[in-house]
Image (cartoon, rainbow, N blue to C red):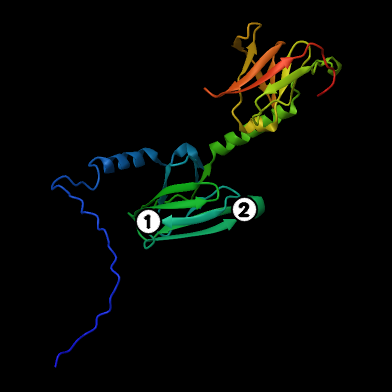
């Protein structure tokens, strides 16, 4: 007796297998031989150690900088307090060694003065690890070192970049509040200027003069755009860069002119022309 088996017919798919990469003996290197040394040098250069002048009582106050690594000395049976900026919200804390270190967080104060504290304590001396703290404002990199008895009670930061931004904002607000010029009669202002040409976001709203100085008023968009330089046009059409001062949203030019252009860009530059009219207008346009 002959047995017959019926096998199902299956559709065959052609699969292309890329050829194996040929690796020549002795040529493969997992990394450049000097790469680890470069990383080690960079880490050492970025490390900030405690300094005696930076202590306020027992609190070491570092100046924060992006990418810096801050040393934290700890000891068994001692808790070190890492204080964040008031109002700063904690995102996460990641540690290289979670088995031999106790790491937690708490908060003090409330409202705008609420402050997050990250607390660290080693189980034994002679340990080293790192932690990364992320918040809604920045990322902190810290190097933890445990000693046999000396521990930092607390550390915190000053924030020079925040201080600089606040100072610049205050200066900008002060400049906005100051008048663009003093000592002129508003009845003597001449608003007889025409503005033509391109229509960029910074296109001036108007131009006027007081018989001695010319003022060019820009929209608020000038604060977020590249400020265009001002060129005066001579009778022959030649352009000459002129000195001016930026006061809030105004260019102040210490002279009168018949024609000027605001230019920005290279080959396909944007040009806005400001022309003084023959008849003076005493009304705001």
Q: Residue furthest top?
A: 236
| First-in-chain label (2 vs 1) | 1
Q: From this viewpoint, is residue 3 visible?
A: yes
The answer to whether the residues at label 2 and label 1 have Cβ atoms under 8 Å apart is: no
Question: Mark 2 highlights which residue?
Answer: 114
Q: Residues within 10 Å of mark 1 (few under 14, many from 20)?
A: few
Question: Which residue does the image show at 34% across and 55% down from the upper left?
Answer: 127
Q: State the mark number for residue 211.
A: none
Task: Please tell me whether mark 1 sits on a helix, a strand or a loop.
Answer: loop
Q: Quadrant of the N terminus?
A: bottom left
Question: Which residue does the image show at 55% across and 47% down from the upper left?
Answer: 137
Task: Please tell me whether mark 2 sits on a helix, a strand or a loop.
Answer: loop
Pick the front one: 258 or 226: 258
Percent x, y for residue 201? 65, 31
Query: In the picture provided, is 89 more to the left or to the right than 21?
Result: right
Q: Quadrant of the C terminus?
A: top right
Percent x, y for residue 186? 84, 18
Percent x, y for residue 203? 67, 27
Q: Residue furthest front?
A: 1
Question: Which residue does the image show at 27% across and 43% down from the upper left?
Answer: 36
Pick the front one: 4 or 219: 4
Which picture quadrant has residue 234? top right
Question: Which residue does the image show at 59% across and 28% down from the upper left?
Answer: 226
Q: State the mark number for residue 96.
A: 1
């Amino acid at each position: 007796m002959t047995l017959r088996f019926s096998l199902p017919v299956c559709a065959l798919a052609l699969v292309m297998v890329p050829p194996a990469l040929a690796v020549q003996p002795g040529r493969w290197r997992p990394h450049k031989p000097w790469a680890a040394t470069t990383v080690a040098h960079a880490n050492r250069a970025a490390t900030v150690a405690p300094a005696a002048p930076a202590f306020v009582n027992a609190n070491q106050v570092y100046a924060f900088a992006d990418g810096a690594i801050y040393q934290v000395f700890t000891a068994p049976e001692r808790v070190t307090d890492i204080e964040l900026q008031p109002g700063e919200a904690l995102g996460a804390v990641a540690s290289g060694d979670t088995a031999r270190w106790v790491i937690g967080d708490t908060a003090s104060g409330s409202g705008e003065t609420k402050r997050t504290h990250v607390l660290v304590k080693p189980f034994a001396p002679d340990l080293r690890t790192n932690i990364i703290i992320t918040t809604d404002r920045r990322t902190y990199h810290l190097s933890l070192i445990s000693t046999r008895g000396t521990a930092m009670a607390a550390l915190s930061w000053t924030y020079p970049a925040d201080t600089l931004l606040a100072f610049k904002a205050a200066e900008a607000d002060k400049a906005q509040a100051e008048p663009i010029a003093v000592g002129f009669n508003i009845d003597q202002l001449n608003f007889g200027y025409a503005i033509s040409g391109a229509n960029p976001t910074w296109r001036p709203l108007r131009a006027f003069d007081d018989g001695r100085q010319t003022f060019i008023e820009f929209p608020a968009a000038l604060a977020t755009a590249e400020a265009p330089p001002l060129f005066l046009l001579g009778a022959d059409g030649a352009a000459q860069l002129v000195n001016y001062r930026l006061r809030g949203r105004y260019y102040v030019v210490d002279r009168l002119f018949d024609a000027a252009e605001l230019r920005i860009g290279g080959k396909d530059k944007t040009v806005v022309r400001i022309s003084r009219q023959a008849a003076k207008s005493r009304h705001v346009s």
